[in-house]
Structures are given as structure tokens and as C-alpha cells.
Amino acid sequence: MKKLFALCGSIATMLLFTPLTILAAESGESSTATVPIWLCIPFAGLLLCIAVLPLVKPEWWEKNQPLAVAVWSLLFIIPFAVTYSAGDAVETVLECILNDYLTFIVLLFGLFCVAGNITLEGDLAGSPRVNVIFLAIGTLLSSCIGTTGASMLMVRPMIKMNSWRQHKSHIMVFFIFLISNMGGCLTPIGDPPLLMGFMRGVPFFWSLHLFPILIFNMVILLTVFYLLDRHNYRKDIANGRKPDISKAGTTLKIDGLHNIIFLIMIVAAVILSGTLPNLAAFQDAAGNVRGIRVFREVTLGFPSIIEVAIILLAALLSFKTTDSQIRTSNHFTWGAIKEVAVLFIGIFITMQPALMLLKSMGPELGLSKPLEMFWATGALSSFLDNTPTYLVFLTTAGTLGFTQGIATTVGTIPVKMLTAISCGAVFMGANTYIGNAPNFMVKSISDENGVRMPSFFGYLLWSIVSLVPVFIIDTLVFFL
């Protein structure tokens, strides 16, 4: 533990005395126009805790996650208030919580509840062939109901099918790669970055242009998975493990199927959140989205309120209309959503300086080629929220003066450039557990059900070995 504190102290000292201050893009409009880089220390510290403490102090970390989040959040809020003002600190935190975190966590909560009320029972056993088919279906489903919806719907059946196996953590790792991330690239429903693009003028069905890239990556990753899973499957069989199948092995039964209605409600709410702000009825005379003014310029928009209300109603109706026995069969608990809610409110708050720096630096980074946009967007989406990262680089691309391509509200962007930004944001969210919210939820549910998932660094190693080569191939084939 002393080594951990020493490491944190070294990082903090280095950043604290780094004489670097980044100017915001609109330096004349806010008292927070200059953002010192040392304000990123709490964000780095929280990420370090998430990565290291489950390894060195697992019991302490499990019990004291809220405390750690609160400490790192205050270590950002207090210095921010001292550097600028208490009002600026309150405005920044409220803006983050109300307009980013609230809709984020309500969406996850709704999908978590509704998917937890659907159970898949049957005689399917987790063989390499069955697992590949299941992963392929789930990947394509992600673009229809979102990566979070597909993940929450498929994760428990996947775990059940493979419960008889000993070597199975790799199954859930590839589950995160494909279903929780890559599969969401085909529609704005699939992943929030694409929804933000749709709100800024990218045609709704434009993302279908990414289908060849998705299929290309699926073929590579599913082939790698099949070979790895076949190897581990044979080891399990050799060790005397066998699936408990009493029938033909193909019987399937879905309970709680009526909850599909509530999934559709949630998807509709997400689509409305992207379309209502563009309607005149939801705009004031200046073109700003109407809403409830909370503090200074912080406004909770009416489209967001409608989205939250529909999602919470769907979750409530799902619980009211579903037999509790289905949740028991699913081993449903609140642990996963609680952990995500606690950790991500800290991540959302403490990452604000990093996003401010990224916003100010974006136009000055000299990125003008698709491959540069692909890797820059992807690398930052691995650790920051991929939605604002996508918007930063979308805006950057729109300012480069292109005259041919997709006309958006931020400028004209060549198809190849927009493809690179979209793929970087969606695909590389799979690089870490915090790159996309479903990643952490799948990990938590897997841990709860006896699957020993890799640590933060262990998972990062998996992504470096399995995903980075695929992204390099993507670069050579699609983005040169």
C-alpha cells in the first residue's frame, strides 16, 4: 500500500509542478478559460484506484468505493473552486451531473432492470460453435437495442450456458469486445457517440456504411475466439467436466418476453432525446433547448426529462408485470448497477478538466488524416467518455475546410474521416473496462456469477494482444 501511495505522490508532484496551462477554445467567454493540467490529478488518481486497489486491497475497495470516489471528487472540486470560484465549481459539477451523468445512469438502470426480467432457459451448452453463434447474434443485436441493452440481455444466458466450464473468462472478454462495443456501430441507437452525430446532422442510416468494417472485424475476432475457446473447451472435457444436458440440447425457452415492449420504450426514449431538441417547440428564440434553469447556465432540458421519465416508467412497468421468480432464476442483484453508478459519477466529475483540455487542444493537434483521427479518437475513448471525445474530433474535422463529404452542423466531413472517427470512438471503447459503461457492468455481473474476470491491467493486456492487431489491420485496409 505504501508503494501505491508513493506512486500516486510521484504522479501528483510531477503534474503539480508542470508549467503547462492550456487555453480553452473560447477563452473570452468563461472565467474557467484557462485550465491547469494539475487539475487532472484527481481523474488520474481515481483511475489508478480502480486499476490497482482491487488487486492490492480487494476487501477494502469493495466496501469503500463510495469513500474513494468522494475523496477524489472533492480533490477536484475544492481546488477548482479555489482556482476559479465556488460558483464555477458548482456550475461545472451540476452541468456534468444533470446533462451527462443523469441520462447516462438512468439509461443503464432502465436496461439493467428490463433485461434482468428476461431469462433464457434451455439445454444449450457452451461449446465453441454455440458460443460463436451467440456472440455473432449479440453483436448484430447491439445496433438494434444498443450495446448496453444487448449486453444486459445476453450476459446472463451466456454465463449460464458456460457455467459447467472451468476455463471461461475469455468468453466474457470477447463478449465485451463484440457485444458491448463493436456491435453498436451500425445505428445511432447502438452507441451514444453516433447518436450525438445524428443530432448534428449525420444521416440516421449513414452508420450502415460501417457494416463491412464490422463484418471484417467480426470474422477476425470470432475466428480467434473459436480457436481459443476450442482449446479451453478440450481442456475442460479432458478434466472430466461435462455439460448437464438431459435432452437433445437444442430446447430453448424465453420467460419474460413481454419485456421486449419495455426495451422498445427505452429505445424510443433514446431516439426522442436525439430528435426533440431539433424541433421548434423545444427551442427558445435563440435556438437553445428549452428546459428548467437550475443554476447559472445549467439547464435540464425538457427532452432529457422526457427521456428519463419514459425509461423509469419502462423499468417500473417491467418489475410490476414480471414474476419475481424470473429475477431469481437470473441471479438478479443490484450489485452491478450500484458499482457502476458509484464509480462513474466520480469518473464523470473528475474527468471534466481532461475534457476541457481535449476540447481546447483538438483543433491544434494537426490531425488531418483518417488514420490519425481513428487512433486519436480511439485512444482517448479508451479512458474518457467516448461521446464527448467523438464530438471533439467531429468538430475538429468540421473545421478543416473540406468541401466534399457529409454536411453536418459542424461542417462538411469526408466520409472516410467520419468513418474513422466513428470507428475509433465505438471500437476502442473496448480497450479498457472504463472505455464503455457496459464493459464494467458485464465484468461485475460475471464476477457475481463466479466467472473470474481479468484485473484492470489483465483486461488491458487482453485488448492489446487481441484488439490492437485488428485495429492496425483496420488502419491498413480502411483508413490509409
Image (cartoon, grey):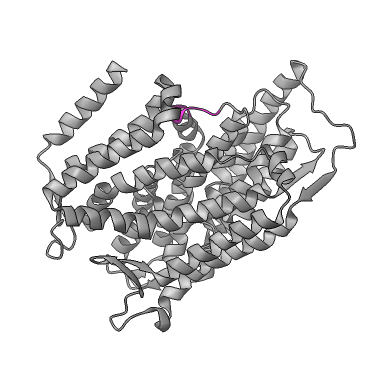
Residue located 19% across and 60% down the image: 25
Give the quarter of the image for residue 321: bottom right
Percent x, y of residue 434: 43, 41
In this picture, is 408 found above or below 313?
below
Q: How many marks?
A: 0
| Res. 40 in view | no
Q: Nearer the viewer, residue 198 or 311?
A: 311
Q: Is residue 10 magenta?
A: no
The residue under the point 26% across, 51% down is 358
Answer left or right for 141 relative to 187: right
**Residue 164 occupies quadrant:** top right
Q: Is residue 169 above or below residue 219?
A: above
Report the residue at 17% width, 53% height from top.
Answer: 86
Q: Position of residue 362 (x, y in %)?
A: 25, 55
Quadrant in which the N terminus appears: top left
Farthest residue in the right direction? 247
Q: Quadrant of residue 252?
A: top right
- Name the foreground residue: 292 vs 416: 292
Residue drawn at 46 percent across, 58 percent down: 192
Q: Is residue 426 above or below residue 446?
A: below
Left or right of 167 in this view: 11: left
Give percent across and percent down for residue 93. Answer: 28, 53
Q: Which residues make up the magenta segment?
A: 453-458
Q: Is residue 92 visible?
A: yes
**Where's residue 346, x and y in %?**
35, 43
